[in-house]
């Protein structure tokens, strides 16, 4: 691994004989004196925002994947008791940054966060929410959304406020949402008045779009920026849809703009990596989770203020708290190791879905993220039936069809996609969702007819 130009084939070939040695090297991976600002060993790692003095937990809570349940009327609602339990654990273990949006969880996330957090002193946590004015560009409609967020979150100020998912469509789209309606002037006045403590944006788009937004820094002074960052997107972002995080990070770092990170696990995909990649990680350190590698990668970059995780289950929350409560930044050798793993994962033909749920609800009831998650899981596990000449094809074919039926209700499967394309405009990854659904449906039909 000392040779940074080692080929992927040689890398895999050498793993068998080198795994033990690599694992031993990893045991002392955290350079002495490289501790970031914040807690001692066993306490939540904190990063200081130099502009405000805020000591922000390096683990942030992304509030868009909380558990839903059916109410007495059959409507999907957030399980508030579960949210309260998760927030209680998070607060008790030093997690103090909570990121939400009017668009999350069918519009219910802000209210659920407000209920859970308002049980604590306001000074004990930082609220981040967004101006998610997708398709609502009027000044009045946008201001109404802004004011409603105060009500939902039970607060009279926002610590971190973001223009939501800008970049797609470039400056013309930015102007339509925030300039032509004079909303930027309004937000700047709100920041001056203290109702917005820090103003920034979350970014999805191409490099030229980001460059244009950086040119506005002198005019608007972006206090922070939220980017998609993980060891896959660092150098392997889909060039048709996103920008490499390494470029985004460098541009923000040289301007000394704090970074908040979304999708450190790529919607959970980096917690369920292909078996050969998982084995490489386990050979180095069998005592830590697969997800912890992804979080350590993100946290090892000092410009990162917080890394958001949408923790649905208590087990995920506990594991992430463990990672960030005894935080060990990666050394150069480990960062190179992660780059090698990213190259391996990039060879798997997965759909670039992060399970953000922005495409939901589908007007025809299709479980879009569920279908993509199932497909990606089959690919990741190496259980994809490809042809009848394939070894164990019959077993793989049966497994795909049975698991698909169990994972997705029949009325919500890909064959019910009407191609209306309403989902496309909401996808931050710019996935051609109907095309992917039709492709999966055609594949499933071939499996059923046994014509692969």
Image: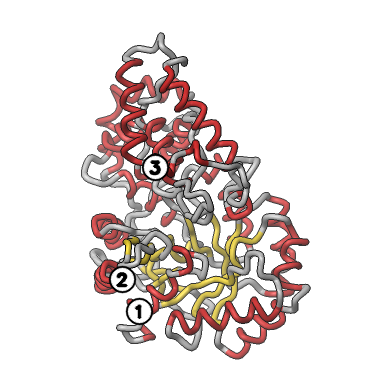
Q: Residue furthest top?
A: 389
Dot 1 or dot 3, earlier in sequence: 1
Image quadrant assignment for residue 111: bottom left
Q: Position of residue 253 (x, y in %)?
A: 58, 60
Name the foreground residue: 377 vs 290.
377
Q: Position of residue 37 (x, y in %)?
A: 39, 69
* Disc number for residue 115: 1
Compared to residue 55, the image places residue 430 above or below, namely: above
Q: Is residue 100 among the parts visible in the rendering?
A: yes
Q: Nearer the viewer, mark 3 or mark 2?
A: 2
Q: CA distance from mark 1 to mark 3?
A: 41 Å
Dot 2 or dot 1, earlier in sequence: 2
Identify the residue shown where x is 33% and y is 76%.
Answer: 116
Figure disc tally: 3
Dot 3 or dot 2, earlier in sequence: 2
Compared to residue 71, the image places residue 161 above or below, namely: below
Q: Residues within 10 Å of mark 3 (few under 14, many from 20)?
A: some
Mark 3 and mark 2 residues within 8 Å of each other at the beta carbon = no
Identify the residue shown where x is 60% and y is 61%.
Answer: 165
Q: Residue furthest bottom?
A: 193
Disc 2 target residue: 80
* Disc number for residue 334: 3
Q: Is residue 59 among the parts visible in the rendering?
A: no
Q: Residues within 10 Å of mark 1 (few under 14, many from 20)?
A: some
* Disc number for residue 438: none
Q: CA distance from mark 3 to mark 2?
A: 40 Å
Question: What kind of element bears circle 3?
Answer: helix
Q: Position of residue 418 (x, y in %)?
A: 58, 42
Question: What kind of element bears circle 1?
Answer: helix
């Amino acid at each position: 691994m000392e040779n940074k130009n080692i080929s992927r084939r040689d890398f895999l070939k050498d793993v068998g004989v080198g795994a033990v040695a690599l694992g031993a090297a990893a045991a002392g991976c955290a350079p002495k004196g490289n501790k970031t600002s914040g807690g001692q060993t066993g306490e939540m790692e904190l990063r200081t925002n130099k502009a405000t003095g805020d000591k922000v937990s390096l683990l942030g809570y992304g509030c868009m994947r909380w558990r839903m349940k059916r109410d007495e009327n059959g409507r999907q609602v957030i399980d508030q008791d579960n949210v309260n339990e998760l927030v209680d654990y998070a607060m008790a273990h030093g997690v103090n940054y909570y990121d939400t949006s009017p668009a999350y969880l069918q519009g219910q996330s802000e209210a659920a966060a407000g209920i859970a957090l308002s049980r604590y002193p306001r000074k004990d946590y930082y609220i981040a929410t967004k101006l998610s004015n997708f398709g609502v560009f009027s000044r009045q409609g946008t201001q109404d959304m802004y004011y409603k967020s105060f009500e939902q979150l039970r607060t009279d100020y926002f610590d971190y406020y973001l223009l939501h998912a800008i970049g797609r469509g470039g400056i013309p789209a930015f102007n339509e949402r925030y300039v032509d309606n004079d909303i930027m002037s309004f937000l700047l006045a709100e920041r001056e008045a203290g109702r917005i403590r820090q103003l920034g944006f979350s970014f999805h788009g191409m490099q030229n779009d980001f460059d244009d937004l950086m040119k506005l820094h002198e005019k608007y002074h972006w206090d922070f920026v939220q980017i998609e960052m993980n060891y896959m997107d660092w150098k392997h972002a889909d060039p048709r849809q996103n920008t490499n995080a390494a470029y985004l990070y460098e541009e923000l770092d040289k301007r000394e703009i704090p970074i908040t990170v979304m999708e450190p696990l790529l919607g959970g995909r980096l917690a369920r990596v292909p078996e050969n990649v998982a084995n490489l990680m386990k050979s180095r350190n069998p005592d830590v989770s697969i997800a912890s590698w992804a979080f350590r990668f993100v946290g090892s970059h000092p410009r990162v203020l917080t890394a958001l995780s949408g923790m649905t289950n208590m087990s995920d929350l506990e594991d992430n708290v463990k990672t960030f409560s005894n935080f060990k930044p990666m050394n150069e050798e480990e960062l190179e190791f992660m780059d090698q793993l990213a190259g391996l994962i990039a060879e798997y033909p997965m759909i670039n879905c992060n399970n953000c749920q922005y495409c939901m609800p589908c007007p025809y009831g299709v479980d879009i993220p569920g279908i993509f998650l199932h497909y990606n899981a089959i690919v990741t596990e190496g259980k994809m039936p490809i042809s009848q000449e394939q070894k164990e094809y019959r077993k793989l074919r049966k497994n795909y069809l049975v698991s698909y039926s169990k994972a997705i209700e029949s009325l919500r499967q890909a064959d019910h996609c009407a191609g209306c394309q309403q989902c496309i405009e909401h996808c931050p990854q710019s996935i051609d969702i109907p095309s992917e659904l039709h492709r999966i449906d055609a594949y499933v039909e071939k499996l059923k007819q046994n014509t692969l």
